[in-house]
Image (cartoon, helix red, strand yellow):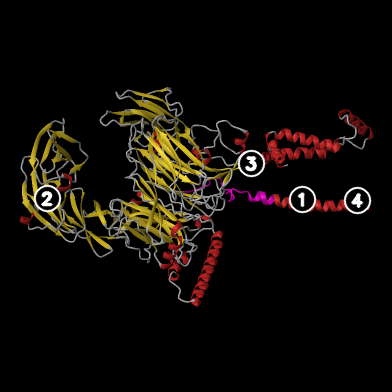
């Protein structure tokens, strides 16, 4: 399909300065042929009604339009919300109501060459699936458009409930408060603790309260982190 | 009144009657007037009550070709036609006659200006009544006659010479004729005349001042009203050649002006503003060549001084304004106080409209700061706007060049102007006697910091603008590395050329796309001012996938000539513009255009209509070099032995689109978004992340680490992504993006019937504090920490002391 002229690679200049300038658009854009239009086929009318529950029609119809297959055919709404798009040849079209304030679901309308109409849900993935919709169309707004994302607000509770903060503060509290609660100066208590330590740990040389503490904390950290801990440790292991 | 409307054409026998006008005098009959060119007029009279045809007549008129252009109905149903070859008027009584009466203009003592087609103007004040028997006959470009039909005789009421435009207006029972005549070079005067007698009405003069660099008046619309004393007052709307509407009240007060040319913007550029207004004013003086070293030093010093002075006044103004409440600060922008803001967010939008009028619009307020109408623009002109010199080279004024090309003949002209003030530059633009095939802006600069523009004519000869000795010398040195391409869509030929040192060219490659099968619809290169920050992408396993960043890559889109649903296809070819090597080729079967393409960095995104599934689809192609770079320091098309890895994925888009563009930022660090103009009037800013051919179907640990979104066939349209919220932009024809001084911010202009300018932040505003940034909180926390350290330090000291004493 393509013929390529031979490329003489004689000059071995390193840096080729090619100025990629878009030429004048000499090419004509493709003929704007829309949906398969028969040259002398009949023309039909798509009818329906759009409803925004709870809102007076005159408040929104002026800004709304009916688009059939993009901007192929455009219709306007009457003050009662009804509309009719004339001069549409047979075919399959996506009809959508657009309004800057309300959201409407699009509907696919199939028109046979004899003028039989059928409306169904738009499904771009399974295009042949038919879930019938009423015809003449009854299009109900699904709600107002939400153009704005809620800005993150900053509050003390958010700060305190942050997992990182929880992770930092709780161990701190334990370190500070635990020695105060358990009186380590009491010799009986100390003996009891040592005994319990020995019970837990069969090896008598290792047990050390502080080490046990750190072990305990690293364990609790690891469990709360779950997924992220692997992220931290694995590359480090690799580097070694 | 003859109602002009597109009436159907009826086939009758073997000749076609073209019905061009209908007329009714309000007496129960409607006449449809049709013509068989150069043969006869067909008149069909219908009854208004039941639509029955009352009568049908056919009148010989071998000289007539178009009723709308040469005939009017006047008086009691008299069809009046004018014919220039026979220099005569033809009259036909629609009610009775079946023959046209010829009245030679000579018999009325009139003469037609040579080469001028005379025009008739009539008026029917009330559609239910007959038209007036007075009418205008234009005999020359500035010559009108007010005539009256009186008992079958034509009487001259008044001769208007010179007169540019005439119009009838009616108020109540009074009909007046408004005549515009030239006063001097910059103004016209309007006067009212009584239609019945041709007498001038007193105190009805109105002056219309033509804007400098504006167009000539083209049409006149008069609104007449009766004053309390029964005299006629009026207001006029003047339409000028540059598509401006001006509404004027007596005695010449302009009520409003509308620039309708702005609804048809063809191309635009955003130009940085000068640092200060005074600086821009001084540019003219410093733009001239310096003669000696001493004077140059002095000039430099004085210019620096002026800059310092301007800066201080600017600071003073800032300080002064800050003390005033915000509402009182006047933000009126004029050319004098135009200056760049800290982050270069305010720019000059230079817009080129189809009518040939240029506009300079302030991007912050949207006010038009200058307008310039170019005469003699061919109706099918193509425009290309280029910035030759930016505002960065202070003593030299910024310079824009507009290339205007007649699409039929290929002949082009250059208009060189200052984009800040709109003034035509002093630089003489070269005469271009040959048709121009291609124009290219080189990164080379002449000694005045103007980029060099190369123009390739149909003899494949290259001319440079500016073409000083310095430029030619540079060109000779660089010639071996200057390549360009030409597209001939009619023959389906893409060809690459190389520049020789003598400014002739040499064909190096050619790709022919057979026109019987497919045609080239668009060729897209990359934007020259685009920066790519990172050379590769970090993968989940910590290796790097390097991007194939070929600045010479062209995306060529083809469409099949066979438009049948089953056989139509859309093709895309990625060609290296220097070597002609086809890097990649993809075909979308059972698809058709219009195809919208965006080509940037190492990716091409295109959108087409899938005829098979009746939906719009997006396809994305990304090119990668692989895990290692061949040559990381410099890219050369001639030395790239390895073909790039090509990844492609397609998605469904649940809407058709009008236009598409990618965001652009200064350094290219910010992630990219695609700006998509939708028919619904919204401008969607979709993250490029959604159009990534590496979106995995099965989520793995690695893909999650790379932040890849799992593959979903349908792309979402979220209303939060609409950058224009509920302010719809009708019929978007193009989107222009420009970087600002802030890396996070990209300036966007959408133009179509409306013009919409905004800023987008594809990666949020990472380099700017939010508006509601809590300074109080931060400072209180800092203060609290400071005091806490002070107190704890003190406490620690006390404790240490106590311990030492123990």
Front disc: 1 or 4: 4
- Label 3 with label 4: CB-CB less than 8 Å: no
Q: Residues within 10 Å of mark 2 (few under 14, many from 20)?
A: some
**Can you tell which of label 3 and label 4 is closer to the viewer?**
3
What x and y, as percent, mark residue B484?
A: 41, 53
Give the image quarter of residue B558. top left
Secondary structure beneath dot 4 equals helix
Which chain letter matches label 4?
A: B
- Report if the CB atoms under discs 2 and 3 are less than 8 Å apart: no
Callout 3: few (<14), some (14-19), or many (20+) C-alpha neighbours within 10 Å? few
Residue sitting nearer the eye, B449 or B141: B449
Residues at marks 2 and 3, CA–CA distance in whole angstroms:
84 Å
Q: Mark 2 lies on which chain?
A: B
Provide the residue designation for mark 3. Answer: B542
Residue under numbered circle 2: B83
Query: What segment is highlighted magenta in the picture?
Result: B758-780
Measure the C-alpha gap from mark 4 to mark 2: 121 Å
Q: In this view, does A166 lie to the left or right of B352?
A: right
Q: Which of marks 1 and 4 is nearer the N terminus?
A: 1
Mark number displayed over residue B803: 4
Sequence order check, earlier mark of 3 and 1: 3
Whether residue B655 appears in magenta in the rendering, the answer is no
Q: Is mark 1 on a helix, strand or loop?
A: helix
In the rendered image, residues at marks 3 and 1 fall on the same chain: yes
Q: Is there CB contact under 8 Å for labels 3 and 1?
A: no
**Mark 2 or mark 1: which comes first in sequence?**
2
Q: Name the residue under label 1.
A: B788
């Amino acid at each position: 399909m393509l013929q390529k002229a031979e490329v003489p690679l004689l000059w071995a200049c390193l840096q080729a300065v090619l100025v990629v300038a878009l030429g004048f658009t000499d090419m004509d854009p493709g003929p704007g042929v829309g949906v398969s239009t028969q040259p002398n086929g009949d023309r039909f009318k798509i009818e329906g009604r759009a409803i925004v529950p709870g809102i007076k029609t005159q408040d929104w119809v002026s800004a709304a339009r009916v688009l059939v297959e993009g901007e192929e055919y455009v219709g306007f709404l009457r003050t009662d919300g009804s509309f009719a798009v004339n001069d549409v040849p047979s075919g399959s079209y996506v009809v959508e109501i657009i309004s800057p304030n309300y959201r409407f679901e699009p509907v696919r309308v199939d028109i046979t060459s004899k003028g039989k109409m059928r409306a169904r849900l738009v499904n771009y993935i399974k295009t042949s699936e038919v879930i019938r919709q009423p015809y003449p169309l009854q299009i109900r707004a699904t709600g107002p458009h939400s153009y704005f994302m809620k800005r993150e607000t900053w509050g003390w509770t958010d700060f305190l409930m942050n997992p990182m903060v929880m992770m930092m503060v709780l161990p701190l509290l334990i370190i500070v408060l635990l020695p105060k609660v358990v009186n380590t100066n009491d010799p009986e208590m100390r003996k009891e603790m040592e005994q319990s330590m020995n019970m837990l740990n069969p090896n008598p040389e290792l047990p050390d309260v502080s080490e046990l503490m750190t072990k305990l904390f690293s364990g609790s950290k690891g469990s709360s982190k779950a997924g992220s801990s692997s992220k931290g440790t694995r590359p480090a292991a690799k580097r070694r | 009144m003859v109602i002009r409307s597109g009436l159907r054409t009826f086939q009758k026998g073997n000749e076609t009657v073209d019905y061009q006008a209908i007329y009714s005098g309000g007496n129960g009959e409607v006449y449809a007037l049709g013509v068989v060119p150069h043969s006869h007029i067909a008149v069909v009279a219908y009854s208004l009550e039941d639509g029955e045809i009352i009568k049908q007549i056919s009148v010989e008129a071998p000289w007539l070709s178009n009723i709308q252009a040469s005939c009017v109905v006047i008086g009691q149903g008299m069809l009046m036609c004018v014919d220039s070859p026979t220099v005569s008027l033809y009259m036909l009584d629609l009610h009775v006659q079946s023959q046209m009466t010829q009245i030679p203009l000579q018999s009325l003592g009139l003469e037609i200006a040579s080469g001028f087609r005379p025009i008739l103007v009539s008026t029917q004040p009330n559609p239910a009544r007959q038209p007036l028997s007075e009418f205008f006959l234009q005999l020359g470009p500035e010559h009108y006659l007010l005539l009256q039909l009186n008992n079958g005789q034509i009487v001259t009421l008044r001769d208007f010479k010179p007169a540019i435009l005439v119009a009838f207006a009616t108020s109540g029972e009074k009909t007046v004729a408004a005549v515009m005549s030239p006063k001097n070079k910059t103004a016209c005067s309007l006067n009212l005349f009584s239609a019945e007698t041709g007498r001038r009405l007193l105190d009805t003069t109105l002056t219309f001042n033509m804007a400098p660099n504006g167009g000539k008046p083209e049409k006149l619309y008069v609104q007449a009203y009766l004053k309390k004393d029964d005299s006629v007052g009026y207001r006029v709307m003047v339409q000028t050649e540059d598509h401006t509407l001006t509404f004027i009240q007596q005695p010449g007060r302009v009520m409003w002006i509308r620039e309708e040319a702005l609804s048809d913007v063809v191309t635009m550029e955003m130009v940085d503003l000068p640092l200060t207004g005074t600086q821009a004013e001084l540019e003219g003086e410093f733009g001239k060549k310096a003669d000696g070293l001493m004077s140059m030093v002095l000039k430099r010093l004085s210019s620096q001084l002026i800059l310092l002075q301007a800066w201080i006044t600017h600071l003073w103004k800032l300080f002064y304004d800050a003390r005033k409440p915000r509402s009182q600060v006047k933000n009126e922008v004029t050319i004098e106080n135009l200056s760049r803001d800290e982050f270069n967010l305010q720019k000059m939008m230079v817009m080129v409209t189809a009518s040939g009028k240029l506009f300079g619009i302030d991007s912050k307020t949207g006010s038009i700061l200058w307008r310039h109408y170019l005469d003699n623009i061919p109706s099918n002109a193509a425009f290309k706007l280029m910035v030759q010199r930016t505002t960065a080279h202070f003593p030299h004024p910024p310079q824009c060049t507009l290339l205007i090309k007649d699409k039929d003949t290929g002949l082009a002209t250059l208009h060189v102007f200052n984009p800040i003030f709109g003034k035509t530059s002093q630089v003489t633009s070269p005469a271009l006697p040959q048709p121009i095939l291609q124009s290219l802006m080189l990164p080379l600069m002449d000694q005045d910091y103007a980029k060099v523009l190369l123009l390739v004519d149909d003899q494949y000869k290259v001319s440079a603008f500016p073409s000083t000795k310095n430029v030619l010398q540079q060109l000779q040195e660089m010639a071996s590395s200057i390549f360009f391409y030409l597209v001939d869509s009619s023959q389906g030929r893409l060809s690459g050329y190389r520049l020789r040192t003598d400014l002739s060219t040499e064909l190096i490659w050619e790709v022919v796309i057979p026109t019987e099968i497919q045609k080239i619809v668009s060729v897209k290169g990359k934007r020259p001012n685009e920066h790519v920050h990172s050379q590769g992408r970090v993968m989940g396993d910590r290796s790097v996938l390097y991007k194939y960043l070929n600045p010479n890559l062209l995306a060529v889109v083809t469409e099949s000539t066979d438009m049948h649903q089953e056989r139509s296809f859309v093709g895309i070819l990625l060609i290296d513009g220097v070597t002609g090597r086809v890097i990649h080729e993809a075909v979308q079967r059972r698809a058709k255009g219009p195809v919208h393409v965006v080509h940037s960095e190492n990716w091409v995104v295109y959108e087409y209509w899938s005829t098979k599934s009746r939906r719009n689809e997006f396809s994305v192609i990304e090119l990668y070099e692989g895990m290692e770079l061949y040559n990381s320091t410099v890219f050369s098309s001639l030395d790239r032995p390895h073909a790039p890895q090509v990844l492609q994925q397609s998605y469904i888009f649940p809407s058709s689109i009008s236009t598409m563009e990618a965001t652009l930022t200064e350094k290219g660090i910010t992630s990219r978004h695609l700006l998509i103009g939708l028919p619904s009037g919204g401008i969607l800013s979709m993250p490029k992340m959604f159009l990534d051919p590496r979106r995995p179907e099965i989520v793995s640990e690695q893909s999650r680490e790379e932040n890849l979104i799992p593959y979903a066939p349908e792309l979402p349209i979220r209303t939060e992504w609409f950058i224009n919220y509920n302010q719809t932009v009708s019929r978007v024809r193009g989107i222009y993006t420009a970087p600002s001084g802030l890396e996070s911010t990209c300036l966007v202009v959408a133009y179509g019937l409306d013009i919409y300018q905004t800023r987008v932040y594809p990666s949020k505003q990472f380099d700017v504090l939010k508006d509601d940034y809590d300074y109080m909180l931060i400072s209180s926390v800092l203060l609290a920490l400071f005091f806490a350290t002070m107190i704890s330090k003190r406490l620690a000291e006390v404790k240490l002391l106590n311990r030492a004493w123990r």
